Amino acid sequence: MSKPFSRKPKTDLPASALRTRGLPSRDELVAFITEQGGKIGKREIARAFRITGDDRIALKDMLQELADDGVVGRRGKKISRAGHLPSVTLGDVIGRDRDGELIATPVEWDEDELGPAPKILVDVPARGRKPGMVPGVGDRVLVRVEPLDEVEPGGATHHGRVIKVLSKQSARVLGIFRGLPDGSGRLVPVDKKNAGRELAISADDSGGASDGDLIAADIVKQGRYGLPAARVRERLGSLKSERAVSLIAIHTHQIPHVFPAAALAEAEAAPAASMRGREDWRRLPLVTIDPADAKDHDDAVHAEADPAPDNPGGFIVTVAIADVAGYVRPGSALDREALERGNSVYFPDRVVPMLPERISNDLCSLKEKVNRPALAVRMYLGKGGRKIRHSFHRVMMKSAAKLSYTQAQAAIDGAPDDATGPLLETVLRPLWDAYAALKNARDVRGPLDLDLPERKLLLKPDGSVDRVIVPARLDAHKLIEEFMIQANVAAAETLEAKRTPLVYRVHDAPSLEKLEALRELLKTLDTEFPKSGNLRPSHFNGILRRMADTENATLINEVVLRTQAQAEYASDNYGHFGLNLRRYAHFTSPIRRYADLIVHRALIRALDLGTDGLPDGTTPDTLGEIGARISAAERRAMAAERETVDRLIAHFLSDQVGATFSGRIAGVTRSGLFVKLDDTGADGFIPAATLGDDYFVHDEAARALVGERTGESFRLGDHVDVKLIDAAPVAGALRFEMLSEGRPGKVAGRGKRGMRRMAATTSGSRGPSGPYKPGPKKAKGRR
């Protein structure tokens, strides 16, 4: 018999009466959600069970209880079986089962939140066995998945049919070759986890590698004694200078960085755009406002007072975006390579662009005083900043000026130069007036408002780090950001109104588990977080404001950030929680993001603006597959960029071993503390065993390590002084020694929760008289 629901329905009917009113039982409801494979909504469930009227309220309660019990998962208005995968999943082939069948696990899976990743039994249809389409261990594949009817303990839970093999790779070790006088050498791994675990390379197996070369090698021997032996398979470039440090991340993450000949040929052969099918907007004084060192310019802006008598105090805001769709046609070599790359990748010393420079830096860059094709949106705003209406246009424009953020801000602040002086009253002030109205509307909307400064590395001519700065956050930055957000919203609204499929930029609300962890932390700070109701960014903003002038401000900003889900691209819309928007799509950067190019093509098709829009036969399923690929490419880029910054800063600090620094505790784990330095933002690790002669245990709720004997604690966000003990530039790893005393406190075992609870969160062990030995660290998925 089905388990009855314990929550009383809002219809005030007893649970036993639900079935007679036509509502499904708990088991029937779970079975139906499971059968659907992908995510469905309450509307589809109600239609399937013919639920109408007040019964819809009872259905809503039933679904909420299933979500609270962890039986189903919710993403906005979409519901799926908890732990189940979407119908199209990106997976990594990790091995074979006992029958020799390939097994994959999903790329996007948070083990801390969802438990162990499900296993997918990979199948390639006989008709699909084309060269390059048969996956192997180590490959990344796009698969269409269905849950298996029968699941063995520890076995596969899903069946996956291969749609496409995205990357073929075999196991290999990346590292730096350190040559020895006899021609042999050592491989120093670039992986931070393997820092210090060198491999021996004989002279015969060195492949001509020179000291300082980045190499790929195969492990050929791993005995019980001595160093494992390896053979150089490929020389990837020299790392004699820090300017080449980004090569490590490029090869580690397999980021495509060499354009195929066919794509380059298409780019070089592309003619300049003509006026055919375009409105002439060349007299409109649009301007680009970008970082001073920007090499491509894909957006231009203009604002003026709305002369319409029915919109007093209103504005007309125009955002023009480079018309990349006119040059990169669906199915072309340029298009295939752009999809493979997904986005441009920005390193401190170089950019790996999504498109060749002939397109990105020339034909599609909105250069000053040069005719350039664009797709533009004209938005009419009321006095309070609310958008009244908008329209899209395919145009030919001519940028009136190329300005930097600091240059435009200086003009508004009373220091115009030769370029901004003539534009100050006619172009710049109307932009700032329109932004003031938009800011009012933004404040009413209440998006998530985190205060986390971003650092920027300034390099010397040789590519090494000169210094690390925190650029000022100017109104000029916020103006462009808000204009782009409004243009993105307009694109999504137009395509929804035209019933044209698109790729949304979506951001889910935080999970229940992460919210509960946040509540537990706030309790230790005598602060409450709402337990129920419709969660909005304003709830987080209230906490941030309350903590703004306290010693815990940085801590709370960091924890709130970690509580958030990760934004992604999808053909299903479940809104953007962080921006507090119901519909949102990326439209404003098609030079560097493939998602924006898809949205441009969708607009061209929906509004009949040309023949180069979305191809016939494009479906939400097709765009869902593209969304999965470019979401993975975005995470790949973020990881590569972060690791490169870590390596450059480790190089920068490597000659300061023994120096002392101030910083904040940025992470607390059972095995130690991560500390972020104030000046450089560098992250380093302090093993728990080095914190002193006490035994420190992990208090997960308080985000702290607490001494068993003394009660001394080190908590997330604490300001501390540390000494640099070791720097591994190749791995980007730093190790610190704690110099500061911890917070005084009660002995851990005397608290209300007791040592038993805290010890249960610690998998490490301690010998009878020896120091703390941390247990294995659990892998954590990216947000």
Image (spheres, rainbow, N blue to C red):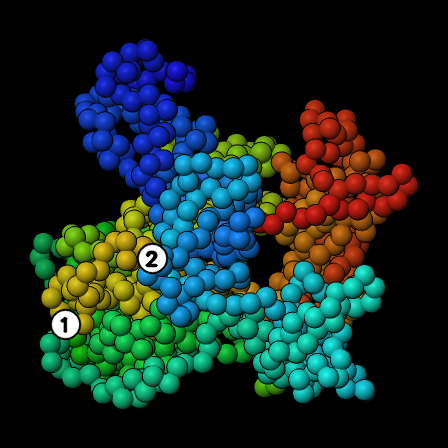
Q: Amino acid at mark 1?
A: Thr
Q: Give coordinates of residue 46: x percent, y percent.
A: 23, 30
Q: CA distance from mark 1 to mark 2?
A: 23 Å
Give percent across and percent down for residue 446: 36, 46
Q: Is residue 185 left or right of residue 387?
A: right
The percent coordinates of residue 774 (x first, y second) are: 75, 46
Give the answer, above or below, for where 380 lies relative to 713.
Answer: below
Residue in the picture at 75% in, 59% down:
736
Q: Nearer the viewer, residue 776 or 640?
A: 776
Q: Position of residue 112 (x, y in %)?
A: 56, 43
Quadrant holding the N terminus: top left
Q: Can residue 429 be seen in the rendering of this structure?
A: no
Q: Identify the residue at the far left of this view.
A: 309
Mark 2 sits on what residue?
625
Crowding near pointer 1: few (<14 within 10 Å), some, many (20+)? few
Q: Which residue is mark 1?
A: 611
Q: Residue flagged by tag 2: what amino acid is it? A: Glu
Q: Quadrant of residue 42?
A: top left
Viewer-side label of 1, 2: 2
Specify whether 177 is left or right of 74: right
SS state under label 2: helix
Tag count in the figure? 2
The reply to whether the C-beta atoms of the residues labelled 1 and 2 are less than 8 Å apart is no
742 shown above or below 274: above
Q: Residues within 10 Å of mark 2 (few under 14, many from 20)?
A: many
Closer to the camera in the image, 611 or 480: 611
Q: Quadrant of residue 20?
A: top left
